[in-house]
Amino acid sequence: MAATFFGEVVKAPCREEEEEEEEEGRRETPEDREVRQQLARKREVRLLRRQTKTSLEVALLEKYPCSKFIIAIGNNAVAFLSSFVMNSGVWEEVGCAKLWNEWCRTTDTTHLSSTEAFCVFYHLKSNPSVFLCQCSCYVAEDQQYQWLEKVFGSCPRKNMQITILTCRHVTDYKTSESTGSLPSPFLKALKTQNFKDSACCPLLEQPNIVHDLPAAVLSYCQVWKIPAILYLCYTDVMKLDLITVEAFKPILSTRSLKGLVKNIPQSTEILKKLMTTNEIQSNIYT
Amino acid sequence: MFVPCGESAPDLAGFTLLMPAVSVGNVGQLAMDLIISTLNMSKIGYFYTDCLVPMVGNNPYATAEGNSTELSINAEVYSLPSRKLVALQLRSIFIKYKSKPFCEKLLSWVKSSGCARVIVLSSSHSYQRNDLQLRSTPFRYLLTPSMQKSVQNKIKSLNWEEMEKSRCIPEIDDSEFCIRIPGGGITKTLYDESCSKEIQMAVLLKFVSEGDNIPDALGLVEYLNEWLQIIKPLSDDPTVSASRWKIPSSWRLLFGSGLPPALF
């Protein structure tokens, strides 16, 4: 409890999650339950084929065999894969994950245009067991396990290798120096027990941790003994940024992306174009 | 569900399960870290559910370069077979509406694994204490009826204080009395469910406030140690207390990164 300037006593935030909510749950009326179920339906993660507008009947990786799966989470990671990997081969869209949460800019959960389709899955036409996911939306904590279920299904396969790319703000990085003095952006990695190759950058030191969808995927892989590696770029610019995207470049020489990257100078040009088209002229008056 | 690290599930029949409740000050979880770290317990598996917020990081109990790169997730199980101890560590909070399903899954695993008893380490808001509680020790215990039968005499000999009942609805004077553990997270649910399922469970908790809760965690493990004697009993010198428990490497920078020198 804490007292405010005006003398009123208020409940201070506690690291433990409120138990009051659970006590309310026990006294939940049928109306409350209906509202809660409606909200759960609104927040459901659905996997569908955009071309036919039909839902995928089974989990994505139960429908297709997979030897390699590269997942980009966040706009900078997505831009990196778009420029360096997707432009080096022919990729066919196999599905898209549709979801809504409070972070979405749109309130319309039924009609998502192609620019808003947040989580798109592709496979390489020349080698259809190689998959790629471009995820530029935020997948909320109550949706992360659903996403895993819809993508990986209930039978984990050990003979595939997973690579995840994402960014975090440099202030999340714990170090004995001040984070302001760190040479950001910089790359760190986390890998599962069964990932035997070496990372192209140092591993993430204690006591640093990772949350959200990258953590959900990596946890799944660790538990089910699937070789997986997460490349984490700590940056001080969370919006689309050339220097941040280029910080992922060391991954191009790893086995994760082996054979998938052809023309690096051309990719760099594509990346620069991506930056300019996404630049929003903004000042405090707009 | 429990997923073993190795090929088969280890035999936990007759073991004592130690676990934290995610509660005020995270005292139970800090205490579990001290136990796992000090006893050098080995990881035997994961408690994989959709009830906890996902998180990963490298081995929180790393002591050297060689053992620092094993990935850890939000709910892991460790054991010390020589002492018939198994420890569950929880490292994140519950996803909304998932705490009750978690309790059900956990207790179902406790029954199926053959664990003899469960000890929950927890905490409760110190500001909710009544006058009597303010003047007494901050430690409390609770036993389910089936646990009472087996350890009543031992607990009596320790002169411990049992958790008192308080008004179910504090604001109402003629409200009934019941066990309340404000700030205790799932502690009360686990306790109630264990009572009805006849599971041998003990709850050990401390009244705490949010802040630097390391001393509270050290206090709670010493309290547990009075009973289980997992490490050598405390001598008369209280200053020796802190050094008996091994602080894990993951407790570094608990209050954030270094400060920019220019600030001063």
Image: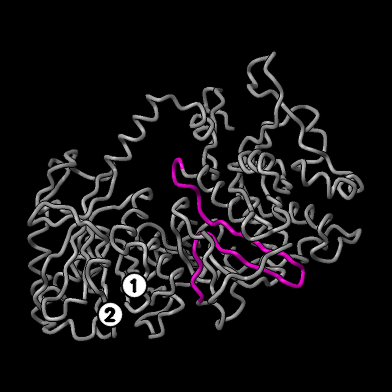
- The reply to whether callout 2 and callout 1 are in contact (CB within 8 Å) is yes
Name the kind of residue labelled 1 in the image.
Tyr
Q: Name the outermost residue toward the top.
A: B174
Q: Position of residue B111 (x, y in %)?
A: 64, 54
Which region of the structure is painted magenta? Answer: B70-97
Q: Tally the marks.
A: 2
Q: Residue at x 23, y 45 (%)?
A: A104
Lateral position of residue B56 relative to residue A232, left or right: right
Does label 1 lie on the same chain as label 2?
yes
Residue A169 point in image, percent of width and height:
35, 60
Q: Quick check: A126 left or right of B188?
A: left
State how far apart marks 2 and 1 are (Cα). 8 Å
Residue A251, label in figure: 2
For label 2, count other residues whose C-alpha is less than 10 Å away and answer few (under 14), some (14-19) or many (20+). some
Circle 1 sits in a helix, a strand or a loop, which is it? strand
Residue under circle 1?
Answer: A231
B220 lies left or right of A283: right
Q: Chain of mark 2?
A: A
Q: Against B116, is A107 above or below?
A: above
- Residue B65 percent location from the top left of the image: 55, 82
Q: How is the image coloured?
A: one colour
